[in-house]
Amino acid sequence: MEAIIRQAIDFLCAYEMDHQDIDFDDHIKRFLREMEAGLAGLPSSLEMIPTYLQAVNQIPVGRRVIAADAGGTNVRVAAVYFDENKKPVIENLRTFSMPAVESGLSRIAFFDAMAGYFAGVLDASEKIGFCFSYPTEITANRDGRLIRFAKEIKAPEVVGQMVGENLNLAIGRLGLGGSKHIVLLNDTVAALLSGVGFQNRLYSSYIGFILGTGTNCAYIESNANIAKQKGLDPRQSQIINTESGGMAKAHWGQIDRQFDASTTNPGVHFFEKMISGAYLGPLFLTVLHRACRDGLLSGGAAKAIGQLSDLSTKQMNAFMLYPCGSNPLAGALAGGTSQDAVLAYVIADRLVERAAKLAAVNLSAMAVKCGQGTNPACPICIVAEGTTFYQMKTLKSRVEFYLKQHLENQRGIYTEIIGVEHAALIGAAIAGLTN
C-alpha cells in the first residue's frame, strides 16, 4: 500500500502538480504584489474593482428595502428588513428564471422582463439592493455597466449598458412607479456584507469568499491605498472585488498548462482552473489520462478511463466519498486492480489538498492586506459561499487547517469562517440600506 501511495505522489511531483509544490508564504507574497499593482492601476491579473460600498455596522432597524439576487439562470426578489434584534426578515420571496435564457431578447425586452419581477415588492421601499452576479464595472453612483453575460443568457444588447439606470427606465415604461435608488453589487461583495449583518459576535473586518462553480474574494481596503481611483476620501474605506479567480501568478504544473489549453477559454482564469467546481473534476480526469499513458494503472483500468471524455467535480467527489460506489470513475476502475483505485484516490485527494492550500493562500492574502484580525477576541469574519467549499470531501477542514497553521500560528492573524443563509439577498439588502 505504501508503495502505491508513494508512486502517486512521485507522479504528481514529476509534473509539479502536488500541493508540496505550493510554497504558502511565497504565494501570499505573489497575491499581495498582484493586489497592490491592481490597486495602483498597474498591469495585474487581479482586477481589484472598487465597489464604492462601505461595510457599515449600523444597519437601520425596521426599515424595508427591496433586495434582488440575479445569478446563473435565476432571479430572486424579496422585501427585507432587520428586526429589533437586528435579525434579517425576508418577505414575499419569489424566484424567477433569468430573462433571455430560453430565447434571445433585446435590451428593452430584457429590462422590461426584469422590472416585471419586481412588481410585487416595489411598494415596499424606494431603495433596491441588487446582487447582479455577472462581470460588471461599478461606477461611483453605485450603478454598474455590464461587461459580459454568462453564455446561457442571450441578450447581447444589454452588454455595455448601465443595469440600474435601465431597470429604472423599465419600471417607468411599465407604469410601476417612480425611479428607485439602486445599489449594484456582485455575489462575493454581497457575501461579505451579509457578515456585517451576522450579529453573533464582534469582528474586526470582513472577507467575502466564493468557491463554487467559480471562485472570487472581496475584502475591505482603505481608500488611501486605491491609487488608481482619484477623488476618494482617504479617511474612508470600501469593499474591493478582487476577481481572484484570474490570479495568474500562482505555481502552475505541467498538466495544468495542458488542461488550460483544452478549455473553452485558454489563457484566462488561471487560479479558478486549479480550485473551482467548474474545473477540478475535468482537471483530475486530465491528470488520470496522463497517469494511464505513463503506465501507472493496469491495462483494464487504463482502457476504461481512456474512454471517459468528461468527469465533473461532483462525480470526482462521489468517487472520493465512495471509491467502490456507483459513479463513473469507480465503474471504470472496476475492470482493473485494487491498486488502481488506491492510486486514483491518492491523486484525487492530493489535488483537493492543493485546492484547499491555494484557497487558504487567497484568504490569507486578503486578511494580511486588510491589516486586521490581530485580536483573537475580534477576528476577521470570512463569509464563505459555494457548494465546492462545503461539499467537496475534506476541502473546508483543510482550508481551516492552513489558516490556523500559516495565518494564526505564524502571523498572529485570527479568522472565523461562517456561512450565512440567503447571503446574497441579505448582503444586497444591507448594501441598499446603508449606501
Image: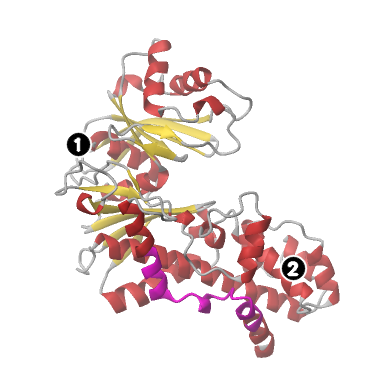
Alpha-carbon neighbours of circle 1 within 10 Å: few (<14), some, or many (≥20)?
some
Residue beneath label 1, please?
61
| 17 is within the stretch colored magenta | yes
Mark 1 vs mark 2: give the one in front: 2
The magenta span reads 10-31
Confirm whether residue 151 shows in the render: yes
| CA distance for labels 1 and 2 | 57 Å
Q: At which x and y percent is residue 89?
A: 31, 37
Front position in the image: 243 or 34? 34
Kindly identify the residue that appears in the image at 55 percent across and 66 percent down. 393
Please tell me whether residue 2 is drawn above or below residue 96 in the rendered image. below
Residue 310 pos. (x, y %): 72, 56
Q: Is residue 225 above or below residue 123?
A: below
Q: Find out whether residue 420 is within the magenta segment.
A: no
Eyeballing the image, is 39 above or below 425? below
Give, as a three-letter code, the residue at label 2. Answer: His
Query: What secondary structure is marked by label 2?
Result: helix
Mark 2 Cα shell of 10 Å, populated few (<14), some (14-19), many (≥20): many
Task: In the rendered structure, find residue 25 and report the number of the disc placed on it.
Answer: none
